[in-house]
Amino acid sequence: LASSYMSGFGNEFSSEDPRCPGSLPEGQNNPQVCPYGLYAEQLSGSAFTCPRSTNKRSWLYRILPSVKHKPFTPMPCGDLTENWDEVEPDPNQLRWLPFTILKSTEKKVDFVAGLHTICGAGNSKSRNGIGIHVFTCNTSMVDKCFNNSDGDLLIVPQQGDILITTEFGKMMVEPNEICVIQQGMRFSVDVFGETRGYILEVYGAHFELPDLGPIGANGLANPRDFLCPVAWFEDRTVPSGYTIINKYQGKLFACQQDFSPFNVVAWHGNYTPYKYNLKHFMAINCVAFDHADPSIFTVLTAKSTKPGVAIADFVIFPPRWGVADHTFRPPYYHRETTLFLFMQGKLHEFLKAILFRRLNFK
């Protein structure tokens, strides 16, 4: 299981599996011959020419190249879709009951098969917008992994722990924690019973920590509390076939290869999966009068090109002291040109609400 991590948000990390000491090349990214005969691959999360402050990339040193697979072919998408523009708009407040989790004795459903699209805006083809999904599953992904070419996935477990194996290493993610799998990263999900959670997908942008402004240097989600997996690999052949599922322009495609994709022995860079425990969020509150806007509880934001406007904000209302005179908290009513999406059901106290923008419900 995932037992150790590196801390920080957006840091320059480096890691190698201790079973292969010296597997991370020194002094260069792409030597003519890599240690142990590994293959060097660069995974880019931004254009090569982006400014250094926004340039996202990591170098992976793996046993076999990730391109060594059979061609992708279309596969059924189930309840995963981008067809929200076909739905008539409804300005009323909407909510839904928790999605039913099938028992494994009825039907085995893994993470990908259990994806249900609720709502969204924009589309992956234009590289602008978001999708909101729920996942329900009762079985682990076996000899199968998922890769999203459309955008980043912010995964919020609600019931049941999930063990996420990525090309960078393993992460155990529990309720009250979140994790982000960034665009292009392959991952597999193991579960330990009936499992449910939420997913925020963003196209054309990456999640960032919000600017703190007059709050100063500290507060809200602190970078040191974000955890990144350490290198872990498996050198395993799969004669019966290992399935790579790729989400591309809103559709699912599958291909086969005869080895595990989690064969990265060492890696370095600033483009990684990561997780965060919501109990570490340092809430800022009013201590005089009135009620601060809910943006003060933003954990992560995906910025748009318009300053001060996000494609999506991930916001929590954690347990906290709320002290103020001459006010009623929360405001009786808040009229917005953006839209609040409140999670209903058995979601834990840490995750009472999530704020999204410009949505069409599926």
Image: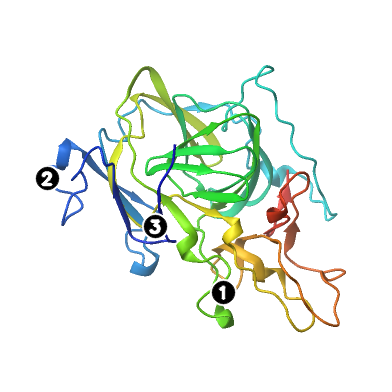
* Residue labelled with disc 3: 46
Q: Is residue 178 above or below residue 220?
A: above
Quarter occupied by residue 17: top left
Label located before the other in sequence (2 or 3): 2
Which of disc 2 and disc 1 is earlier in sequence? Answer: 2
Numbered disc in front, either 1 or 2: 2
Query: x, y (%) of residue 266?
Result: 27, 44
Task: Point out the image quarter for the N terminus.
Answer: top left
Determine contact: label 2, label 3, CB under 8 Å: no
Residue 52 vertical placement versus 142 (above, below)? below
> Would residue 60 be seen by someone viewing this image from the given angle?
no
Query: Which of these two is toward me, 6 or 103?
Result: 6
Apparent side of residue 123 relative to residue 326 in the rendered image (left or right) = left
Q: Position of residue 44 (x, y in %)?
A: 35, 52
The residue tagged 1 is: 307
Marks 2 and 3, Cα distance to the nearest angstrom?
Answer: 25 Å
| Circle 2: element type | loop
Which SS class for mark 1?
A: loop
Q: CA distance from mark 1 to mark 3?
A: 20 Å
Circle 2 crowding by C-alpha within 10 Å: few under 14, some 14–19, many from 20: few
Is the residue marked by circle 1 packed among few (<14), some (14-19), or many (20+) residues within 10 Å? few
- Asked whether 88 or 50 is in front, the reply is 50
Q: Residue at x 86, y 82 (%)?
A: 326
* Residue type pointed to by label 3: Ser
Residue 32: mark: 2
Q: Amino acid at mark 2?
A: Gln
The residue at the point 72 percent across, 53 percent down is 349
